[in-house]
Image (cartoon, rainbow, N blue to C red):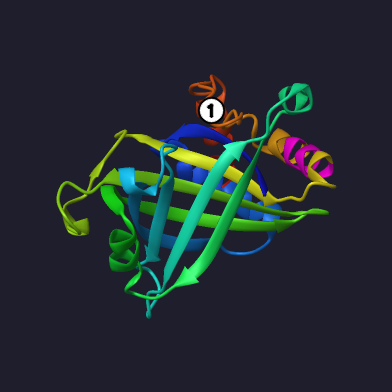
Amino acid sequence: MECVVQGIIETQHVEALEILLQGLSGVRKERFRIHELCLKSGPNLGVVSSELRIMCDLEHPTPAWTVRHVGGAMRGSGAEQLSVMVRTMVESKASKNILRFFCLLGYRLDHELLKVGSTFRFQRGVRITVSVTSVNKVPRLHATEEAVPVTPGIQLVEVTAPAAGDNYNEVAGAISSFCEFLAPLVHLSKPGVSTGIVPTAAAAAASLMSNKSL
């Protein structure tokens, strides 16, 4: 399973956020350009629908495919008290024939995305990953070169960390503490909870950019 929070930031402030993240991590960002295919189950696979995401990072010299399934979020009073979402997640490496394999099983291709951005990794008691992503819709089959932004001028910020049934409270606390560093630029909350742009983002970004030029 994993713990996750998300937020949004204006594209004009992404460089400032990356400066902050690089200062916190001490390492350079990892760039990605992921072609993502969203598959949904057909009627022959049961009444309860399921969704799979097949991904290929086109930034790598030898692109490799990964299949990812994100399950439901943890429920109950304990989950409601957490500032992060705790959900099941399974990810595995796959061959280039993975799309054909799942289509033969009864899944259908629902839509395609091109996700372009950068990742920063941290070790703060738990392994925290921060990604800053421009999400683009692919208008026709596999035409990634024609992808257009889903939300022009806005990018997605996501903070995740692996967790288990016996330590998700600890992981949630680590993520909440880490998010305080980013609070002047982006407000992070459970996926699906809209929080909008942080009012202080412009001033915080200007401060970070001015320090960069010194």
Q: How far from the left and from the top, in percent, is residue 20? A: 62, 46
Q: Which residue is mark 1?
A: 201
The relative height of residue 158 versus residue 67 in the rendered view (above or below) is above
Q: Nearer the viewer, residue 61 or 3?
A: 3
Q: Residue 72: which quarter of the image?
A: top right
> Is residue 172 rendered magenta in the image?
yes
Q: How far from the left and from the top, in percent, is residue 143? A: 17, 57
Answer left or right for 138 relative to 113: left
The relative height of residue 139 versus residue 92 in the rendered view (above or below) is above
Label 1 crowd (10 A; few <14 / some 14-19 / many >=20): many
Q: Residue at x 29, y 45 (%)?
A: 136
Q: How far from the left and from the top, in percent, is residue 121? A: 64, 58
> Residue 213, can we see it?
no
Answer left or right for 48 relative to 77: left
Q: How far from the left and from the top, in percent, is residue 77? A: 77, 21
* Amino acid residing under circle 1: Ala
Q: Nearer the viewer, residue 126 or 28?
A: 126
> Residue 75, can we see it?
yes
Q: Nearer the viewer, residue 95 or 57?
A: 95
Give the farthest residue toward the bottom: 62
Q: Residue at x 50, y 21 (%)?
A: 194
Q: How many marks?
A: 1
The relative height of residue 37 versus residue 82 in the rendered view (above or below) is below
> Is residue 5 rendered magenta in the image?
no
Q: Secondary structure at mark 1?
A: helix
Answer left or right for 98 relative to 31: left
Q: Nearer the viewer, residue 196 or 161?
A: 161
Q: Residue at x 51, y 27 (%)?
A: 192
Q: Which residues are the magenta region? A: 170-176
Q: Main secondary structure of the magenta part?
A: helix
Q: Residue at x 72, y 33 (%)?
A: 180
